[in-house]
């Protein structure tokens, strides 16, 4: 017997093999059997897919660290603490992260120290002390130095107690077998046990030092005196310090040292050294250690080097003119002089740097005049080469027992040079040049760490880890660059998606590695074995690796579905990156920020815009920088990253207005710049652009949101004549909120996406016309009592406004009593979705508002749309009657970011993309946030697709598009349509980057990428053979029967 397809609504019918009832054609029966088997096989293929196999196939996750501020380098790894509150261990072989911890936003890392197998951190302005296992990063113990009720602030004021420092002690004060450590927090010095972080003793050094602002904590070993070692709290005594006054000037008139016994904490002595005559005081922040029992600082004028040598409880002060110590610089004397500790055990040297022009190593021996033992100078002056820099590392002790430092300078043609110097004698022991480091493109170096290793021939080699100005990490050894980490990716603020070239570009030749026929065949064979459950665990892992590293994802040209894209991301650090959407591979990068100077003190990106090229042309990137009192516009070629042109703007920019259709040609797009005086300039001042600008001015408006005054102001632009190139503005409207009790907490402008239809068809065949106004603005304000102790649910409420930004009209207003922020919102088409906290219910809440045009229809909307019988233009000056539908829902996870999905034609259902406080990305179907969800769904409601109302929004695990991954400190989410209508690109950024493709209505217009074509071909061929064999057999039997 063989199965036959369903007959009518009944089930399959089974017939005897020789039965010919109903004159059914055996070939037809065979074809139906083949078709049924084929459909069954395809069904089996679709149900075996599991979510674990999909992880990493269309998405990637890039972990970052942030700008490195603390580094401890060893032979095989480096421990780093970053400005993004990340503590991590990075392997020196590959640059991969061995382990990582992301601390809370307020828990900034203040100090990092390595004590044996423990990594100690002081963070949160000295509030937390933690010990971590240096091998695996696990937490050993944690101690809270002070709580909110124990602010270590005395009558002297907070600035006197602002020092935060951590010092290791080569002593065991509590006899537990482990060396201890000391911290200074809030003016108190504490010695704590490394066993569990418990306090051994504590002393108030601010009280002991009088009006002394403590800056640093130092340890003096016992070899310098009889008995145990000393802890020295160093700082400056201030004159004119009066925190009760708003404006006052202070002067560091004396250097102070508070001496404490390291074992008991007993106060020993206060040493005060007044500033030398004519020095004008000391420079605060310049106090450094110069060896084990010496300290050095600089006077206020930067011309004197003051050193203090301790001998027990006595000290000697020595003052030297820096001009007599340091060799003159070929670049002049305008650079600022500062000191740099070398941290050499038992040494007596300190580094003196003159800006980024020169570094000198000065030997400070007690009783002798300071002497310069080594000097490294820049090959060119700072003004001639802004990337020129010289950085000196901490001293290290190789196996030979000597202490070295690393000096780095840019070479004119050769690259970066490393010189290893004996810090006591100044002898050069090793020199190495790294030609592969383009230091000019990275604007120099902030910090350098050095580590030694033993080569096979027994000699000593050196690894150099550079922390560059562009926030990149570079490990170099043996004249080669081993790896580079681009940590500016941890602070992305802007992004854009554009198409790759039509054909492979020469700029991306290294990515031309399409899979070979053998690789394709191997993948299909593994797919077949996996489907038939015949694959071994090794083959399953091989298949998973092939899917994740599919070379087709990273081809350097566009595909017909628009899955391969170029991602342009601009970081807060001023670096622009081009990434491939396939696996996040870096194609090129460009550092755009100039070096700070007297004229350029505040640099930031105020406008970032990507524009697709037409007919295969290269896309264009426009970046406008704020440079204090001036601005700069840069046009960048999208495929190579080269700067096409630059324009200096002699004014500070307040707003940038882009007029014209998005994605249009560059010559059809007008950009207006609003300066700080509300004057409007045209970025392109050619005649054609000015003519286009004059034509657009009557319909051009813009607005400002002033959070400080809780107000919104709308402006119009006009030209006094046709010849002017600078236009004036006029205030058109304003909305003022009572800023004493109400403040603006959120605003959302429309997400300009394709709109498939402006009508919504109801279940009863009626229609609602959407009110789609591109000039709408959503604003949320918070009103709450200033007295937090008496705050009740009635004293706090969120007010939601929907305004028209052309006329300032308030289209809708809604008050949520008993609510407060944070508020996050997204505005798209005719709906707005926003999130807030419900105080009364103690839950997170999301509300949705949908706006419809309630004008009486003269003609049926569908007929009017088809035959064009209705005027479809929308004017802000003629707002129709509106019907606003709203509903609120509870949601479980807290939200910190929000956006909406968008597709090419706007046909696919939308999803609200939420970034949760757990740093995951959740896609919430818009149908759950429908204000028309009925309490009891009728037949027409179900036909319309409405879901029965429930006050709780469902959290479906499969809707977490980041599955089990976390985007550390998630801040922003962007979406962009692919060429395929069902698919959108999604990029979520924080410290990490996460990219994926989402399909809100599933993949209704494409076959899955891992579809098993081999199994399909084998099945079709097998079924064809079966059909032919069955037909032959039936014909033979028919012939035999007729002969009988």
Image (cartoon, rainbow, N blue to C red):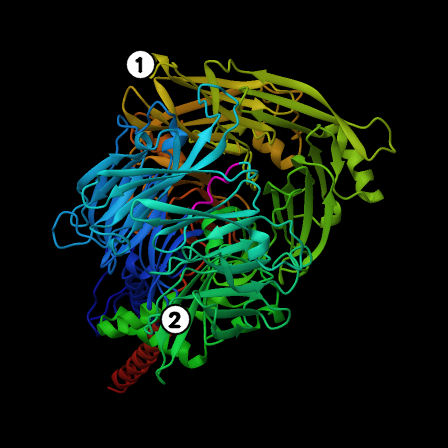
- Residue furthest front in the image: 367
Question: Residue 216's quadrant in the figure?
Answer: top left
Q: Can residue 966 be seen in this view?
A: no
For mark 1, what is the residue?
A: 792
Q: Is residue 928 found left or right of 686 in the rendered image?
A: left
Please provide percent x and percent y for residue 55: 34, 58
Q: Residues within 10 Å of mark 2 (few under 14, many from 20)?
A: few
Q: Nearer the viewer, mark 1 or mark 2?
A: 1
Q: Is residue 599 left or right of residue 512?
A: right
**Residue drawn at point x = 68 percent, y = 45 percent:** 632
Numbered-mark total: 2
**25 part of magenta stretch:** no
Magenta-colored stretch includes residue 285: yes
Q: Residue 126 carries which label?
A: none
Image quadrant where one finds the N terminus: bottom left
Q: Position of residue 1032 (x, y in %)?
A: 32, 82
* Magenta residues, dominant SS class: loop
| Camera-nearest residue between 129 and 182 | 182
Q: How far apart are labels 1 and 2 at the CA level?
A: 64 Å
Which residue: 85% across, 33% down?
Answer: 724
Q: Where is residue 411 drawn, in percent x and y? A: 60, 68
- What mark, if any, has residue 1013 been given in the picture? 2
Residues shaded magenta: 281-287
Residue in the image at 57% along x and 57% along y: 326
Query: Residue at 30% of width from left, 36% of height from top?
Result: 893
Question: Tag 1, which secondary structure?
Answer: loop
């Amino acid at each position: 017997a063989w199965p036959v397809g369903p007959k009518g609504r009944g089930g399959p019918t089974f017939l005897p093999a020789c039965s010919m009832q109903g004159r059914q054609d055996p070939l037809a029966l065979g074809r139906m059997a083949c078709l049924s088997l084929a459909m069954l096989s395809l069904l089996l293929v679709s149900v075996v897919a599991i979510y674990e196999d999909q992880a990493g196939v269309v998405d990637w996750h890039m972990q970052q660290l942030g700008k490195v501020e603390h580094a401890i380098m060893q032979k095989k790894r480096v421990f780093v603490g970053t400005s993004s509150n990340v503590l991590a261990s990075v392997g020196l072989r590959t640059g991969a992260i061995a382990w990582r911890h992301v601390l809370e936003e307020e828990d900034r890392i203040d100090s990092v120290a390595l004590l044996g197998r423990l990594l100690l951190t002081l963070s949160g302005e000295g509030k937390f002390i933690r010990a971590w296992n240096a091998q695996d990063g696990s937490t050993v113990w944690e101690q809270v130095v002070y709580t909110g009720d124990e602010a270590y602030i005395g009558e002297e004021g907070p600035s006197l107690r602002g020092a935060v420092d951590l010092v290791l002690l080569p002593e065991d004060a509590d006899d537990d077998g482990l060396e201890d450590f000391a911290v200074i927090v809030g003016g108190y010095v504490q010695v704590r046990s490394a066993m569990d972080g418990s306090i051994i003793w504590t002393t108030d050094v601010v009280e002991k030092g009088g009006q002394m602002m403590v800056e640093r904590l130092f340890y003096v070993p016992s070899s310098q005196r009889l008995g145990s070692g000393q802890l020295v709290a160093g700082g400056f005594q201030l004159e004119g310090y009066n925190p009760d006054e708003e404006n006052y000037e202070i002067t560091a008139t004396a250097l102070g040292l508070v001496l404490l016994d390291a074992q008991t904490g007993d106060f020993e002595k206060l040493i005060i050294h007044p500033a030398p005559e004519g020095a004008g005081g000391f420079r605060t922040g310049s106090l450094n250690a110069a060896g084990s029992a010496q300290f050095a600082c600089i006077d206020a004028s930067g011309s004197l080097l003051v050193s203090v040598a301790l001998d027990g409880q006595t000290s000697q002060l020595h003052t030297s003119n820096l001009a007599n110590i340091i060799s003159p610089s070929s670049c002049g004397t305008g650079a600022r002089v500062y000191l740099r500790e070398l941290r050499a055990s038992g040494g007596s040297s300190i580094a003196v740097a003159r800006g980024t022009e020169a570094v000198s190593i000065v030997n400070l021996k007690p009783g002798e005049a300071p002497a310069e033992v080594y000097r490294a100078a820049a090959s060119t002056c700072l003004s001639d080469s802004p990337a020129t820099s010289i950085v000196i590392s901490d001293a290290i002790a190789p196996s030979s027992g000597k202490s070295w430092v690393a000096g780095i300078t840019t070479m004119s043609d050769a690259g970066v040079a490393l010189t290893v110097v004996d810090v006591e004698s100044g002898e050069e022991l090793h020199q190495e040049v790294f030609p592969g480091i383009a230091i000019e493109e990275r604007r120099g170096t902030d910090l350098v760490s050095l580590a030694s290793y033993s080569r096979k021939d027994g000699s000593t080699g050196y690894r150099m880890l550079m922390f560059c100005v562009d926030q990149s990490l570079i490990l170099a050894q043996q004249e080669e660059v081993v790896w580079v980490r681009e940590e500016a990716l941890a602070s992305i603020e802007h992004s854009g998606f554009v198409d790759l070239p039509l054909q492979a570009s020469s700029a991306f030749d290294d990515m031309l590695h399409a899979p070979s026929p053998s690789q394709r065949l191997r993948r299909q064979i593994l797919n077949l074995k996996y489907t038939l459950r015949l694959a071994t665990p090794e083959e399953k892992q091989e298949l998973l690796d092939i899917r994740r590293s599919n070379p087709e994802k990273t081809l350097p040209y566009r595909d017909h579905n628009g899955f391969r894209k170029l991602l342009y991301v601009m970081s807060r650090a001023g670096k622009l990156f081009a990434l491939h959407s396939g696996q996040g591979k870096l194609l090129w990068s460009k550092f755009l920020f100039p070096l700070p100077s007297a004229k350029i003190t505040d640099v930031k990106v105020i406008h970032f815009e990507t524009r697709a090229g037409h007919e295969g042309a290269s896309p264009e990137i426009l970046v406008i920088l704020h440079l204090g009192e001036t601005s700069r516009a840069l046009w960048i070629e999208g495929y190579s990253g080269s700067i096409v042109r630059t324009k200096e703007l002699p004014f500070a920019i307040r707003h940038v207005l882009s007029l014209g259709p998005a994605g249009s040609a560059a010559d059809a797009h007008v950009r207006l710049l609003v300066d700080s005086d509300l004057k409007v300039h045209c970025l392109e001042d050619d005649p054609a652009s000015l003519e286009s600008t004059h034509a657009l001015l009557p319909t051009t408006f813009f607005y400002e949101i002033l959070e400080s005054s809780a107000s919104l102001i709308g402006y119009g632009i006009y030209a006094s004549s046709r010849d002017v190139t600078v236009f004036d503005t006029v205030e058109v409207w304003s909305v003022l909120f009572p800023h004493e009790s109400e403040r603006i907490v959120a605003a959302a402008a429309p997400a300009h996406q394709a709109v498939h239809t402006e009508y919504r068809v109801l279940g009863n065949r009626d229609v609602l016309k959407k009110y789609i106004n591109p000039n709408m603005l959503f604003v949320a304000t918070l009103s709450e009592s200033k007295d937090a102790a008496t705050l009740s649910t009635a004293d706090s409420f969120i007010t939601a406004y929907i305004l028209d930004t052309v006329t300032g009209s308030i289209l809708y207003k809604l008050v949520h009593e008993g609510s407060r922020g944070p508020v996050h919102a997204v505005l798209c088409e005719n709906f707005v979705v926003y999130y807030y906290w419900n105080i009364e219910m103690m839950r997170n809440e999301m509300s949705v508002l949908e706006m419809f045009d309630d004008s009486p229809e003269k003609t049926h909307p569908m007929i009017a749309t088809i035959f064009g019988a209705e005027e479809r233009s929308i004017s802000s000056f003629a707002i129709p009657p509106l019907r606003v539908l709203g509903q609120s829902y509870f949601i479980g996870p807290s939200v910190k970011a929000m956006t909406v999905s968008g597709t090419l034609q706007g046909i696919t259902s939308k999803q609200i993309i939420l970034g949760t406080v757990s740093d995951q990305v959740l896609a919430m179907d818009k149908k759950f946030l429908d204000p028309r969800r009925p309490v009891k769904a009728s037949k027409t409601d179900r036909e319309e697709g409405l879901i029965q109302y429930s006050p709780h929004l469902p959290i479906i695990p499969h809707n977490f598009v980041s599955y089990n991954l976390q985007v550390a400190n998630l801040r922003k989410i962007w979406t962009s349509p692919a060429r395929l209508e069902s698919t959108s690109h999604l990029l979520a950024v924080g410290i990490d980057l996460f990219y994926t493709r989402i399909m809100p209505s599933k993949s209704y217009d494409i076959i899955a990428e891992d579809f098993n074509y081999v199994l399909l071909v084998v099945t079709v061929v097998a079924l064809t053979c079966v059909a032919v064999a069955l037909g032959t057999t039936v014909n033979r039997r028919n012939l035999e029967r007729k002969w009988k």
